[in-house]
Image (cartoon, rainbow, N blue to C red):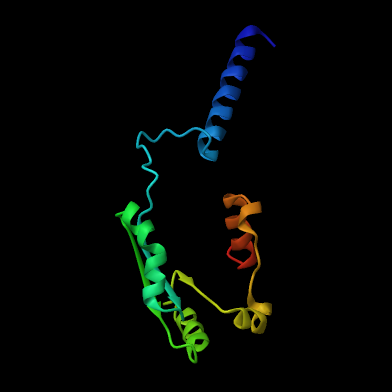
Amino acid sequence: MNNFQTILIGIFLALFVFAVLIFSGVINLDNKKESGTLKGNVVIWGTLSSIDFYKVFETLTETNPDLSVSYIKKDATSYQQSLIESFATDNGPDLFLITPDMIAKNKDFIIKYLLLLIQKRFFVIHLLKELKFL
């Protein structure tokens, strides 16, 4: 190999490594600075009192003005059926609270993950595979 070929291969390898770093997210070419605040709309269902629930998230919504958290209190006797129907029609909440007895009764239908031990990217990929989207 002559010097020209060696230099050309070196340039292509450098561009390849640079492209991999960009697509993997290690190098961010976006000039926008992330503000670190949360934004969006979150709908939560549960059987707790709405007043107690809003007290918990009052500080969160005050420090993140672009975040809207709405809690919908459901009747405890029909809560599980409401969840099933809402998921079947793709109108379910973003988050839902369940009681320990509901966990025990539906343990075969619940996917268990300890999010603190799993990286976000791995969790999403594994979840999509589990749900048969990948």
- Residue 11 position in % (x across, y down): 56, 19
Of the 4 image quadrants, the one containing the N terminus is top right
- In the rendered image, is residue 134 in sight? no
Identity of the residue furthest to the top in this view: 3
Relative horizontal placement of residue 88, taking residue 61 as reference (left or right):
right
- Would you place residue 82 above or below residue 39 in this image? below
Tell me where residue 86 sits by quadrant.
bottom left
In the image shown, does 129 or 93 lie closer to the viewer? 93
- Residue 96 position in % (x across, y down): 49, 73
Relative horizontal placement of residue 51, taking residue 10 as reference (left or right):
left
- Would you place residue 31 above or below residue 89 in this image? above
Q: Residue at x 64, y 66 (%)?
A: 130
Q: Residue at x 54, y 25 (%)?
A: 15
Identity of the residue furthest to the bottom in this view: 77
Of the 4 image quadrants, the one containing the C terminus is bottom right
- Would you place residue 27 above or below residue 58 in this image? above
Q: Please count the marks in the image.
A: 0
Tell me where residue 53 sits by quadrant.
bottom left
- Residue 110 position in % (x across, y down): 63, 74
- In the rendered image, is residue 80 in sight? yes
In the image shown, does 14 or 49 lie closer to the viewer? 49
Q: Residue at x 51, y 84 (%)?
A: 84
Tell me where residue 68 sits by quadrant.
bottom left
- Residue 97 position in % (x across, y down): 51, 74
Q: Residue at x 34, y 52 (%)?
A: 63
